[in-house]
Image (spheres, rainbow, N blue to C red):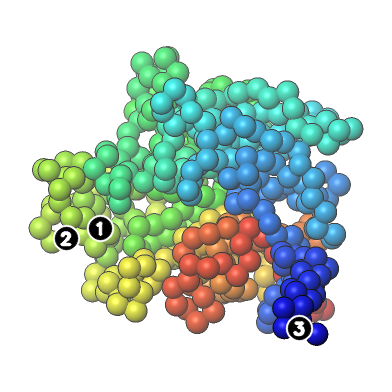
C-alpha cells in the first residue's frame, strides 16, 4: 500500500474516532478528594451565569453570551431551550442575561424573573423582565418589563435576583467598575442616593452600587427604607460588585468583589451602608485607601492602577465618619499595608496573586444536611481560584465563625454554586474564558472545563 493511501486511511480512522467520541467533555470524571466524586454533567454552554432549581428537578441556567435560558436534567445532561432573547446586549464579560428567580407562588402563577443588559438608543441599560412558563410547551413567554433604564456598562454589573420571605424581589447592582481600570476617571456613585425628583421621573441613574428591593410588579415597596429623605427601590448602599444574594430564613446574605483586598461576605439590613468606595472590608486602614480618580487633574493622562500611587491623594478608611456603615461578617482577605501587590511571579496578571478570591455566588448548606462537616455553612464560589469556600455560621446564623475551608479546586472559573435538594451533590457552572489559577496556583488563561456544569457528589456515610 502506498504512503498516500496509508495516510488517507489513518485520517479516515481518526475522523471515525472523533465521530464516535464527543468533542466535549460531558461525562468526564473530575479528580476530587474523597469522600466526593466529581463529574462533568454537560459542557458546550455559552457563558453560563445564573442557575436555579426549576420544575421537574431540572436546573435552569442563563447563558450570558448565548442570550438563552436552558433547562438541564442533572442526571442525564439532557438540555432544552426555554427562552431565546435577541434583545439582549452581550459583551466580553459583564453584559448579557444574568440572574433569574422563580416567583414565590410559581406553582400557581408560573412567573419567572430575569435581568439582562439591553440597548436604549446608544446607551447600555439593565432591566428586570417577567415571563410566564408554559408547562405544555416548556417555554418562557409573555414578557413584561417591570424595571427598565437602570444604568449598565462593561464592568461590575452585579446582577443577582432573589425573592425574600416577605415576597419582595431583591436585585444586586454593581457600580459599573467606575474608579478603576478603563473606567478609572468616571465618578463612582455607589454612595449617591436618588433624589425625589429623580424618583418621580423614574430616573434610576443613582441605582448603581446598590441592592434594590421591588414589589413583584416592579414598584417601590411602601416599607422600603427612607434614605436621604427619599424612598426609592434602594434597600442598601455602598456596594462594589455584588454577585451573590441569598436568603437563609429571614437573613439576607450577600457577597461582593473587593479591589486588591477584602472581598466581602455581608448580612444586609434595611438602609445599611456597606462602605464602598470609602471602605473595603473592615474600617481598618490596612492595604486599601480611596482615591477619587474623577477628581484627579488630567486623570486620563495619569498612570493609575490598584496599587494607590503615593503621589495621589488618598482617603483613609477611618476618615469616613458615617454612622450607618455596616462591616462584613467575613473578608477574603484583609491584606496588611506592607503587602506586595506586584509579585513578579504573576507577571501582567498580578491580580491573580492577590489573596482575594472574586466571590461570584453563594448557597447555604442546611443544619440537617447529610454532610455533617458542612452543616450550617455558607458555600461561596470563586472565579479567580476555581474553587468553593465554606464559611461555617454561628448558631443564630448571622455570623461567620472558624476557619474557611477550600474545596474542589480545578483550573476553571466557578460562576455559581447550587446545592442539590438532598444535600448530597454540589453543582457548579463555569465560565467559558478568563483568567484563573491552575492546579499549581499559577496564572492560567485556558479553562479546564469551559462553559460546563460540574457535579461533586458526596459518597460518605
Identity of the residue drawn at 15% across and 48% down: 301
The answer to which quarter of the image holds residue 422 is bottom right
For disc 3, the marked residue is 2
Dots 2, 1 in contact, CB < 8 A: yes
- State the quadrant of the N terminus: bottom right
**Vertical placement of residue 132 versus 348, above or below:** above
Horizontal relation, residue 180 to residue 15: left or right: left
Identity of the residue drawn at 59% across and 73% down: 410
Q: In what element is the residue under mark 2? A: loop
Check disc 1: other Cα within 10 Å, few if <14, some if 14-19, many if 20+: few
Looking at the rendered image, the disc whose residue lies closer to the viewer, 2 or 3, is 3
* Direction right: furthest residue: 136
Identity of the residue drawn at 80% across and 45% down: 80
Looking at the rendered image, the disc whose residue lies closer to the viewer, 3 or 1, is 3
- On residue 13, the disc is none
Out of 260 and 167, give the one closest to the viewer: 260
The answer to whether one can see residue 435 in this image is yes
Horizontal relation, residue 416 to residue 422: left or right: left
Check disc 2: other Cα within 10 Å, few if <14, some if 14-19, many if 20+: few
**Vertical placement of residue 455 versus 320, above or below:** below
Percent of width and height locating residue 248: 64, 51
For disc 2, the marked residue is 309
- State the quadrant of the C terminus: bottom right
Out of 455 and 435, give the one closest to the viewer: 435
Q: Tell me the distance, in whole angstroms, between the alpha carbons under discs 3 and 1.
A: 62 Å
Percent of width and height locating residue 94: 48, 46
Q: In what element is the residue under mark 1? A: loop
For disc 1, the marked residue is 305
Q: In what element is the residue under mark 3? A: loop
Amino acid at each position: 500500500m502506498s504512503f498516500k493511501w496509508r495516510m488517507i486511511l489513518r485520517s479516515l480512522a481518526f475522523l471515525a474516532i472523533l465521530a464516535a467520541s464527543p468533542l466535549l467533555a460531558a461525562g468526564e470524571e473530575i479528580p476530587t478528594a474523597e469522600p466526593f466524586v466529581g463529574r462533568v454533567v454537560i459542557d458546550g454552554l455559552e457563558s453560563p451565569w445564573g442557575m436555579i432549581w426549576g420544575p421537574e428537578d431540572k436546573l435552569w441556567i442563563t447563558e450570558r453570551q448565548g442570550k438563552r435560558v436552558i433547562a438541564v436534567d442533572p442526571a442525564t445532561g439532557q438540555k432544552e431551550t426555554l427562552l431565546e432573547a435577541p434583545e439582549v446586549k452581550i459583551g466580553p464579560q459583564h453584559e448579557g442575561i444574568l440572574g433569574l428567580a422563580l416567583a414565590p407562588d410559581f406553582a400557581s402563577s408560573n412567573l419567572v424573573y430575569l435581568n439582562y443588559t439591553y440597548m436604549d438608543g446608544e446607551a447600555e441599560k439593565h432591566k428586570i423582565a417577567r415571563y410566564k412558563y408554559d408547562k405544555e410547551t416548556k417555554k418562557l413567554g409573555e414578557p413584561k418589563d417591570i424595571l427598565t433604564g437602570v444604568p449598565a456598562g462593561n464592568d461590575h454589573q452585579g446582577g443577582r435576583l432573589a425573592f425574600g420571605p416577605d415576597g419582595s424581589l431583591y436585585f444586586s447592582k454593581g457600580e459599573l467598575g467606575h474608579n478603576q481600570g478603563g473606567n478609572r476617571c468616571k465618578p463612582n456613585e455607589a454612595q449617591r442616593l436618588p433624589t425625589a425628583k429623580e424618583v418621580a421621573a423614574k430616573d434610576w441613574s443613582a441605582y448603581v452600587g446598590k441592592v434594590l428591593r421591588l414589589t413583584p410588579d416592579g414598584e417601590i415597596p411602601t416599607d422600603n427604607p427612607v434614605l436621604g429623605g427619599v424612598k426609592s427601590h434602594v434597600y442598601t448602599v455602598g456596594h462594589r460588585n455584588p454577585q451573590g444574594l441569598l436568603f437563609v430564613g429571614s437573613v439576607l446574605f450577600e457577597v461582593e468583589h473587593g479591589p486588591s483586598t477584602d472581598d466581602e461576605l455581608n448580612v444586609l439590613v434595611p438602609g445599611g451602608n456597606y462602605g464602598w468606595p470609602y471602605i473595603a472590608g473592615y474600617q481598618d486602614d490596612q492595604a486599601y485607601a480611596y482615591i477619587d480618580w474623577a477628581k484627579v487633574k488630567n486623570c486620563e493622562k495619569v498612570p493609575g492602577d490598584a496599587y494607590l500611587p503615593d503621589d495621589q491623594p488618598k482617603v483613609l478608611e477611618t476618615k469616613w465618619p458615617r454612622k450607618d456603615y455596616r462591616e462584613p461578617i467575613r473578608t477574603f482577605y484583609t491584606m496588611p499595608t506592607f503587602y506586595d501587590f506586584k509579585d513578579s511571579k504573576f507577571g501582567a496578571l498580578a491580580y491573580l496573586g492577590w489573596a482575594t478570591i472574586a466571590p461570584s455566588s453563594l448557597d447555604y448548606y442546611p443544619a440537617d444536611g447529610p454532610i455533617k462537616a458542612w452543616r450550617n455553612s455558607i458555600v461561596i464560589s470563586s472565579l479567580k481560584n476555581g474553587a468553593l469556600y465554606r464559611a461555617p455560621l454561628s448558631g443564630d446564623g448571622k455570623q461567620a465563625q472558624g476557619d474557611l475551608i477550600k474545596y474542589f479546586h480545578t483550573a476553571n472559573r466557578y460562576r455559581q454554586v447550587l446545592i442539590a435538594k438532598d444535600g448530597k451533590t454540589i453543582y457548579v457552572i463555569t465560565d467559558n474564558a478568563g483568567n484563573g489559577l491552575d492546579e499549581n496556583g499559577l496564572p492560567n488563561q485556558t479553562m479546564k472545563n469551559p462553559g460546563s456544569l460540574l457535579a461533586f457528589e458526596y459518597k460518605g456515610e
